[in-house]
Image: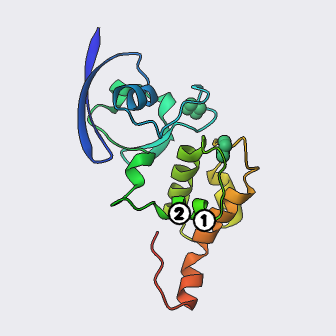
Amino acid sequence: MKYPVAVSVNGRAYRREVEARTLLVDFLRDHLGLFGTHVGCETSQCGACLVTLDGLTLKACTRLAVQADGAQVTTLEGLLVDGNLHPVQSALLKECALTCGFCASGVVLAAKECLERKPVAGEDEVRRSLEGVFCRCTGYQPIVDAVRSLAAAPVRDLRDGATAEL
Ligand code: FES
Ligand code: FES
């Protein structure tokens, strides 16, 4: 038996029919073709499947697609605005902070949420925000440095006479 799901993803409305057991992460990938959200463990440990659901950042392998009915979802793809990367993505790129990129969805969305909560987050806060996001390649330090470069932006940009936007 299939159930209807109507959901807004990255500002675009979708209607699909899914089995009750379909995970949100599988829905995004297999039904909507949004492959920026990765499947790692499917047991809520690795964070590769992070998305934002009605403003809450969560692991999409912990939700059923039917639970997202009527919700607004943002995935990694939704952070692009007019072809421009989100500042967190730009900072990671600039610092060469990721290698294989499998963890990108988790890292970017967790860091974004961290900086939205606290624009001048310290190293401990940045590291805490990345708990539950596994990166097998980098040892985390380049990621933390890249995010911290944004956290320091208001101070740096004030000195330069510019305004920081996150
Ligand atoms: S796939 Fe969801 S936390 Fe690993
Ligand atoms: S860059 Fe490869 S898992 Fe993070």
- Ligand 2 within 8 Å of disc 2? The answer is no
> Mark 2: which amino acid?
Ser
- 141 shown above or below 55: below
Q: Residues within 10 Å of mark 1 (few under 14, many from 20)?
A: few
Can residue 131 be seen from the camera position used here? no
Quadrant of res 39: top right
User: With respect to residue 148, does 102 lie above or below?
Assistant: above
Nearer to me, 16 or 69:
16
Nearer-the-camera pick, 100 or 140: 100
Q: Quadrant of ligand 1?
A: top right
Q: Looking at mark 1, is its residue's CB closer than 8 Å to ligand 2?
A: no
> Looking at the rendering, in which quadrant would you find the N terminus?
top left
What residue does disc 1 label? Answer: 94
Q: Which residue is mark 2?
A: 90
Residue type (three-letter) at the residue carrying disc 1: Lys
| Label 1: which secondary element | helix
Q: Is residue 132 left or right of residue 2?
A: right
